[in-house]
Image (tube, rainbow, N blue to C red):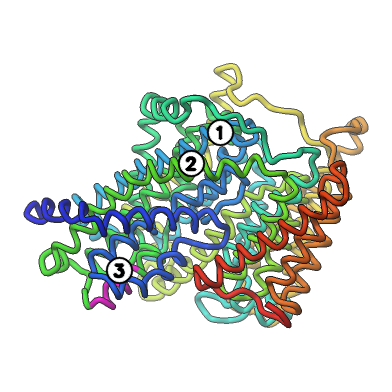
Amino acid sequence: MTEFILPATLHLFEPLNIILMIAGLTGGIIIGALPGLSATMGVALMVPATFAMNPTSGLIMLGAIYAGAIYGGANSAILICTPGTPSSVATTFDGWPLCQKGRADLGLYTSLLSSAFGGIVGTLFLLCLGGSLARFALQFGGPESFWLCLFGLSTIAVMTPDNMGKGIVSGAVGILVSTIGLDPNTGAPRFTFGTYDLLQGVSVIPCMIGLFSFSQVLYLIGTDKSFIAEYHPHKGAFGKVFRYLAAHCKTILVRSSVLGTWIGMLPGAGGEIASIISYNESKRWDKDPSRYGKGSLEGVAASESANNAVIGGSLIPMLTLGIPGSAVAAVILGALMAHGIQPGFKIFTASGDLAYTFIMSQFAVNLLMIPVGFVLCQCMARLLSIRLTLVAIGIVVLAFIGAYAISNSLVDIWVVLAFGLVGFFGGKVGMDTGAMALGVILGPMIEENLGKSVDLSRSVDGGLMSVMFEGSINKVLIAALLLSLLTPFLLKLRNRKHAALLPEGPRPGWKTDLFAGIGFLAIAAAFLVQYEGLEGVSRVFPEVLTMLIGAGGAYFVGKGLWRRSREAAEPEGGEAVAWCKIGIICATSLCYAVLIPVFGFLVTTMGFIAGSTLILGDHSRGLPRLAQTAIVFAIGFSLLVWAGFTLLLNVPVPEGMFL
């Protein structure tokens, strides 16, 4: 190994490789920040470009895009509560509250420095312990992966300690939604609601865009704010964040980075699971867990260091065994094989120069991420100085085209609309959108690995119990799962002894319980009528979830009615909501979704932006001025998005009578 490291390091100082690292980082960060454009898509789009380069330079560029895209998702998660990639879902929990408090720059710098730290730790494990960790990862089969996913799902208990009931039922709703489409074990179609396009299932990214992006559009439009949030740049904020992380977050950064590396090397796991588990562990062991979810730098640091450490972890089995640990690693594996290079242990001897140059480039990329990300943070923070109405309309456009770009399906646009409405109105009555998102992400993995465990049990004497509960890894994960579930109760006991570290806020009114229960019952009923023709394992798993959701809905309806009979009338007031504006943006978005396949993306987008701006814009400036703004914004933004997707990224947009 040592004979390759010095030549590999010298390769990084070649001008072409430096340019490729900076360009890859910049492009990756921008792609990651745009909802719907995942790291996988960004890397896959650039694979053909590597055929004109030598394999080493091409691999360096792909690695830079990978790192940049995973980090880039945090920028939109913090600024507009829209995770650019699924890995950044946990970043919204504290990043968005920071933005609302006018401390967006602190959140952006925390995510930048934590991402770089996590990436370096992951690469260090890749360099020093790649072979040993890859052999350990091979011990994870269906049962181990099942318990790992359940451990990730148990985060709901810590995320919602004061509202655990609704959190658990919301998580069950997310898992049930993930069963739409073909059964991963038998191939049987389920819950298509008479729509052929739903056979492909409900994609994770459109769900995330709806729950976190479109729902935020409705929330922002319904406020009386002129801008998304007040932004007060703190002088010397970067240095303050660096010193704070060095002084107070060392344990969090190291623990989250190690967890991210470990989870990243497990095939099928990914940054979303790593960031969720790391956030959970950070909150669990914090002396004051009440600050999480309210704008804690520790929460952002835990999430971002973990999901960037996943990069190094996912490359461990890819380089050493030829087994990709993530979808992006699979694309890079394909690029290597297209260049005639076969990954495996021999790559470190037969192509040692290439392998170690790529590994060392990941160190350089994560160091370069700091200055490149710093500059881009300054640009992205300017988003907060644009009028809220224009930002909200722009988010709708990016949400729709980003969702469509996943699989070129118009159904994904309707998924965004549906989940946006569920996220907004569900949030009003106490449903937990974060728990629902976890369910959508982890549901397919849980069901698939449970199916593998059942199949494995047929060839084992002890049956399913033996498969699920024997083995040291299973026992460790089960113990961690039980500890995670007990955490909320342990926190309550600790709070009683230490003057309530988690002070309770005002108790929600009985209407939230009643309407949440009605919502859960409606969801259970909608799925219940779709069970005809389902048999065996294809039916059992979703049926248990439906029963849980129905029972939870009945409980909350009963609780709401009981509280209504015993409590005084709820006081009027609360936060004012501009329901008229919310209705308008919903109506225009609905028309936008309907007309896109008729007239095409470009023309329909211009009409949507111009019409929405004229109706929702600031009329105090006069109609001529508003009309001028609407026309310029409609033409300029529509052309920018259309050209960016079709010409620059080569991503198709919906077509119709016109462009």
- Measured in 3D between alpha carbons, the distance from the residue under mark 1 to the one under mark 2, in whole angstroms, is 9 Å
In the displayed structure, 159 sits above or below 592; it is: above
Apparent side of residue 275 relative to residue 505 in the rendered image (left or right): left
Q: Quadrant of residue 528?
A: bottom right
Residue 101 seen in the current view = yes
Q: Is residue 337 magenta?
A: yes
In screen coordinates, is 601 left or right of 442? Answer: right
Amino acid type assigned to the residue bearing label 2 in the image: Tyr
- Is the magenta region chiefly helix, strand or loop? helix
Q: Is residue 538 above or below residue 145?
A: below
Q: Is residue 654 above or below residue 250?
A: below
Q: Residues within 10 Å of mark 1 (few under 14, many from 20)?
A: many
Q: Position of residue 389 (x, y in %)?
A: 75, 48
Q: Could you classify mark 3 by the number of other residues whose Cα lies within 10 Å: few (under 14), some (14-19), or many (20 or more)?
A: many
Disc 1, disc 2: CB below 8 Å? yes
Residue bounds of the magenta highlight: 332-339
CA–CA distance in space, label 3 to label 1? 36 Å
Relative side of 631 to 346, left or right? right
On the rendered image, what quadrant is the N terminus found in?
Answer: bottom left
Which residue is identified by label 1? 292
Where's residue 249, x and y in %?
A: 40, 30
> In the image, residue 298 lies at what x, y percent?
47, 33
The tag earlier along the polypeptide, 3 or 2, is 2
Please give the residue where the numbered disc 2 appears in the rendered image: 279
Residue type at numbered disc 1:
Tyr
Badge 3 is on which residue? Answer: 323
What's the CA distance linking mark 3 and mark 2?
A: 27 Å
